[in-house]
Every structure is written in structure tokens, then in C-alpha cells.
């Protein structure tokens, strides 16, 4: 009966080599306070200088979210005091952020929805506080790192939708190569705003859940708030406008601070940075970074290759994986396979055997472009399986061998004698051997055939075929061996 409004503020760390207003290295995990200089430490009299790469990456995300890039964009000082921010103000954007009034469609298997983007703005991150016992330590390596904040309108209505939005945004920024999307390290983190109200009455009193560092917590935290706020409204109480934190050990949100009135940050234009006017050359350099995004790509892959929704979205999860897939299908077509056949065979192999090897060997899917099993090699192997040159079982072994030995499948198949046996007379020899050795099973199979016990017949037949294949070192064509076993059973009964 209540209407739910959810708006997200997502912070992403841009993958610039240096910080946003100084030349310090921008990296995680370095020795504390080694990537600092007078500018990011806020010494008096220092001058910030805009890192154009940060502006370019920010505008690229803005474009991907269908935002308008204004004619002029500039920076403001946001004043507040906190020990992790030595300047006592943060350089951010307020009146004319680099991206404005965009919107994206979210969909990943089912839910479909349009979410308006209010703005994207570029700012500097603060340092990191480490609380140990009675002291707090400060690491300023993070101070001044390029941060892009993406603010949505309150268009989402459930924890699931918000989770989907963040997952999709994460995939998109990884595709664009501007953020690694690592939520555990804090490269992507979100504040979730939520209110409930009687339907038709507009927005309710907003509660903000701060610093959510996993998309699952976003879902859980918001769904918890929906229940909590609905219960309060049911009881005739009012919601306190406040900031809450998600407690992952207790699966609940808890109050952090009340925020009755908007904090006055006394924004004023940063006097030490000129207004930025994106010119044609700059906008061109931004657009040069645009790539086909995960959602449209998954839709295209479904249409072009005939994959089902699930396969298409799995293949498009990572740009490197999708590129690999399309290259492999392309190569298989060049080797003579029909496109839809190649597409399906390669998707199956990629999403099962290859992914299994990657996760077992701890190879990041993002690095699939540099594995020894190149798209061309996977295509070659797929063509061999399709053409009956190698059995499926041996193809799996061949796959492992390509990884281990960095050789082409054709060479390996030859070297190991994995070539499938399709000669009926050779296979028939193996089947005869089985017949001689497995007299009891043969008799039971025959009895099952006569009694019309299909289930038993099927399992006994499979057993006999398996034995025949084993007798050829797994090389005999399973189809031909199967036919021969069946024929023999029928002939003799
Ligand atoms: P603040 O001034 O507290 O930062 P903003 O108006 O800037 O709030 O909005 C911050 C985020 O909160 C945005 O994502 C916006 O969509 C969302 N939001 C604002 N008001 C509400 C509300 N009443 N209910 C749910 N979300 C809201
Ligand atoms: Zn610096
Ligand atoms: Mg705000």
C-alpha cells in the first residue's frame, strides 16, 4: 500500500594513473602516506591543476549514462572539517557538474526499468582513517584520488532494482575501462536513499544508508528499511530523517546520525581552477572511448548468435569475455562451421569447461584475452568436435593440454593419438571384445530387450558402449559404437 522511492549515490574510483588535482600516484595498497605532496596535503599557497584524464573518464561515464555534458563545467569547494581531509574543504562540483540529466534502462533477466540520472560530478576522495584501540591513524594516499559520483533520481522501488542498477553500472564502468569495480576495496561504493509514502502522496521522509560496499548489502539494507518504515507508518508514527548504517552481522540498519536539515557546506567556486569548457577535440576524445555496453551487447548477442537470455548475459558479463566469444565464433565460421552452430557450441564450451579452468587456475576473466587457449584455438577444437575428428571426452583433455603446453589442438591430437576412430570395422573389433568379456551383462541386456524394460536396457547398453569406448582409449565414435551395440543385441535376441 505504500509507494517506495529509492535514489542512489554511487562513488566510483577512476583509474587515472595520478590523482585528480596533483601528480601523485593513484594506487591502492601502497605504504601509507607515500603518495602525497603539498597539493593533496593542502599546504597553504599550493595550486591544484586538473587531471584532464579524470575529466575525460568522468565525461565518458556521463555519456554512457546518456547525460548532457554542459557547455561549461567547473569546481566548487565543499567546506567541512574532518581529519581525513587536510584542506578542510573538498574540491567537488555543485552548480554545473560534468554530466547532467541522463537516464539508463536496467535489465538483467526479467526486470526492466528506466532510471533517471540526476548528475555525475567529479571530486577528490578523502584520506583513510584506521582506528586501532585508542588511537586513529591517517593514511592520505587516498586523499585527492579521482572520484566520480553518480546521483540518480528516486526512481527505484525495491532492493532488487537498486542491486541491479549497481551491478549494471559496475559492468558498464568496467567495459569502459574507467573503474575496476572492486567493491571490497572500495573502488565502487554506494549510499542508498529511501522513503515510503502513501501512494500518490509523493516522496516521503528520506533515510540514507551510507557506505554500502556490496550490491547484496544494498539489496538487503533497502529491503530491511522498506519493512521497518512500513511498520512505523502502519503504527501511525513518522519516519525520522536520518543517516543509518548497515550492520552485516545483525542483518539490520542502525541509526548513525540524524540529519534534519541539509548540511550547509557553503559551496563556492574554486578560485584556483579555471572553468572547464569542453571543446570539440575534447568531446571527440571522450567519444573515442565509448564501447558497446553490456546490456545492448547482450541483446545483440541473443539476436545475432541465437543464444538464450541466460547464455547471452553470462557471455556479456565482462567485455574481455564477450570479445573472446565473438572472436572464437568468427574464427570457427572461417573454418567452415555454420554460424548458429558455432555460436552455440562455443558458448557451451566457454561457459562450462573454459570457465571452470579459469576459476580453478585463478585466472581473472578480464585476462581471458591472454590465455594460451586463444579464440582461434578454441574454434579449431570446436570444429574438430563438430566434424567428429575428436570425441567430446578427448576434447576436454585437449583443452587442458592446450592450456598446459601452449600448442595448437591439431598438433596435440596428432601427438596424443586422440583422433576419433570412425572406421566401423575397427570399432566392431572393440565391440566383439566386450561381447566376449561381458557375457553376463549381454545376457541381461538381451533379457531386458525381450521384456521391453527400456530403462534397464538403456543403462546396460550405455555400460556396454562405455566399455567399447574404453577399449579404444576413448577414441571410438560414441555414435557408431552405440549403433553397433544395439544392432548386435537385436540380432542375437
Ligand atoms: P541531500 O540533499 O540529502 O544530499 P538530495 O536531494 O541531493 O539529498 O538527493 C540525494 C539522493 O537521495 C538522490 O539520489 C535522490 O534521488 C535521493 N532522494 C532525495 N529525496 C528522496 C526521498 N524523499 N526519498 C528517496 N530518495 C530520495
Ligand atoms: Zn599529491
Ligand atoms: Mg545532495
Image: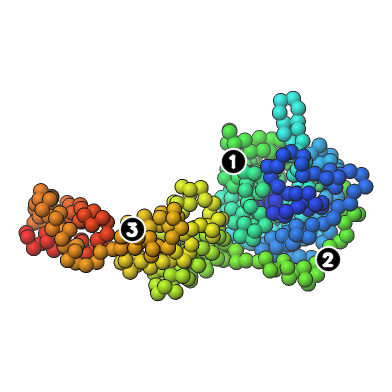
Mark 3 vs mark 1: in front: 3
Q: Residue at x 82, y 57 (%)?
A: 50
Using the image, determine if residue 168 lies above or below residue 33: below
- At label 1, counting other C-alpha atoms closer than 10 Å, the crowd grade (few under 14, some 14-19, many 20 or more) is some
Q: Residues within 10 Å of mark 3 (few under 14, many from 20)?
A: few
Query: Which quadrant, please, contains the C terminus?
Result: bottom left
Disc on res. 277:
2
User: Which circle's residue, 3 or 1, is located before the other in the chain?
Assistant: 1
Q: Is residue 9 visible?
A: no
On residue 224, which mark appears? 1
The reply to whether the residue tagged 3 has its Cβ within 8 angstroms of ligand 2 is: no
Circle 3 is placed at which residue position? 416
**Viewer-proximal residue among 301 and 482:** 482
Q: Residue furthest left?
A: 493
Q: Residue furthest right?
A: 45
Tell which tag, 3 or 2, sits nearer the viewer: 3
Q: Earlier in the sequence, mark 1 or mark 2?
A: 1
Task: Report the number of discs.
Answer: 3
Distance from label 3 to label 1 (Cα)? Answer: 58 Å
Kindly indicate the quadrant of the structure image that contains residue 429: bottom left
**In the image, residue 124 above or below residue 326:** above
The residues bearing labels 1 and 2 have C-alpha atoms spaced at a distance of 44 Å
Report the Cα–Cα distance between label 3 and label 2: 64 Å
Q: Is residue 377 left or right of residue 269?
A: left
Q: Secondary structure at mark 2?
A: loop
The residue located at (10%, 48%) in the rendering is 440
Image position, residue 286 (x, y; %) = 72, 66
Q: Residue 376: tell me if it is visible.
A: yes
The residue at the point 40 percent across, 55 percent down is 401
The location of residue 126, given as percent across then percent down, is 77, 44
Q: Which of the two labelled residues, at mark 3 and mark 2, occupies the earlier sequence position?
A: 2
Amino acid at each position: 500500500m505504500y509507494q517506495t522511492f529509492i535514489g542512489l549515490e554511487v562513488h566510483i574510483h577512476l583509474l587515472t594513473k595520478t590523482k585528480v588535482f596533483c601528480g601523485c600516484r593513484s594506487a591502492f595498497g601502497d605504504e601509507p602516506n607515500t603518495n602525497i605532496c603539498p597539493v593533496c596535503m593542502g599546504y597553504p599557497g599550493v595550486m591544484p591543476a586538473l587531471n584532464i584524464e579524470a575529466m575525460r573518464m568522468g565525461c565518458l561515464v556521463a555519456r554512457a549514462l546518456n547525460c548532457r555534458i554542459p557547455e561549461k563545467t567547473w569546481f566548487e569547494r565543499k567546506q567541512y572539517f574532518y581529519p581525513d581531509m587536510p584542506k578542510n574543504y573538498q574540491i567537488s562540483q555543485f552548480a554545473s557538474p560534468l554530466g547532467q540529466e541522463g537516464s539508463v534502462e536496467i535489465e538483467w533477466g526479467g526486470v526492466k526499468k528506466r532510471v533517471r540520472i540526476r548528475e555525475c560530478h567529479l571530486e577528490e576522495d578523502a584520506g583513510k582513517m584506521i582506528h586501532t584501540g585508542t588511537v586513529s591513524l591517517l593514511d592520505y594516499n587516498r586523499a585527492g584520488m579521482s572520484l566520480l559520483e553518480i546521483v540518480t533520481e528516486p526512481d527505484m522501488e525495491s532492493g532488487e532494482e537498486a542491486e541491479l542498477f549497481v551491478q549494471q553500472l559496475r559492468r558498464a564502468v568496467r567495459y569502459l575501462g574507467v573503474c575496476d569495480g572492486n567493491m571490497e576495496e572500495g573502488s565502487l561504493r554506494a549510499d542508498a536513499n529511501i522513503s515510503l509514502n502513501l501512494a500518490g502522496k509523493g516522496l516521503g521522509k528520506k533515510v540514507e544508508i551510507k557506505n554500502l560496499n556490496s550490491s547484496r548489502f544494498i539489496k538487503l539494507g533497502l529491503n530491511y528499511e522498506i519493512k521497518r518504515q512500513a511498520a512505523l507508518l502502519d503504527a501511525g508514527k513518522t519516519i525520522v530523517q536520518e543517516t543509518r548504517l548497515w550492520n552485516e552481522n545483525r542483518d539490520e540498519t542502525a541509526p548513525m546520525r540524524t540529519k534534519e536539515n541539509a548540511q550547509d557546506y557553503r559551496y563556492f567556486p574554486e578560485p584556483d581552477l579555471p572553468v572547464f569548457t569542453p571543446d570539440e577535440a575534447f568531446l571527440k576524445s571522450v567519444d573515442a572511448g565509448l564501447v558497446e555496453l553490456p546490456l545492448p551487447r547482450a541483446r545483440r548477442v541473443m539476436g545475432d548468435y541465437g543464444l538464450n537470455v541466460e547464455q547471452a548475459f553470462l557471455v556479456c558479463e565482462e567485455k574481455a569475455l564477450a570479445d573472446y566469444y565473438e572472436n572464437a565464433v568468427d574464427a570457427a565460421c572461417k573454418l567452415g562451421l555454420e554460424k548458429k552452430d558455432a555460436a552455440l557450441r562455443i558458448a557451451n564450451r566457454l561457459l562450462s569447461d573454459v570457465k571452470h579452468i579459469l576459476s580453478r587456475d585463478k585466472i581473472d576473466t578480464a585476462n581471458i584475452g591472454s590465455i594460451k587457449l586463444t579464440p582461434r584455438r578454441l574454434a579449431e577444437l570446436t570444429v574438430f568436435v563438430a566434424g567428429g575428428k575428436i570425441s567430446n571426452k578427448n576434447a576436454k583433455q585437449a583443452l587442458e593440454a592446450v592450456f598446459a603446453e601452449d600448442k595448437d589442438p591439431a598438433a596435440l591430437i596428432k601427438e596424443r593419438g586422440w583422433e576419433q576412430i570412425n572406421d566401423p570395422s575397427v570399432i566392431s573389433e572393440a565391440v566383439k571384445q566386450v561381447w566376449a568379456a561381458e557375457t553376463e551383462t549381454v545376457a541381461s541386456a538381451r533379457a531386458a530387450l525381450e521384456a521391453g524394460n527400456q530403462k534397464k536396457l538403456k543403462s546396460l547398453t550405455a555400460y556396454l558402449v562405455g566399455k567399447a569406448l574404453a577399449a579404444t582409449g576413448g577414441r571410438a565414435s560414441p555414435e557408431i559404437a552405440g549403433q553397433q551395440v544395439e544392432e548386435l543385441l537385436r540380432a542375437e535376441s
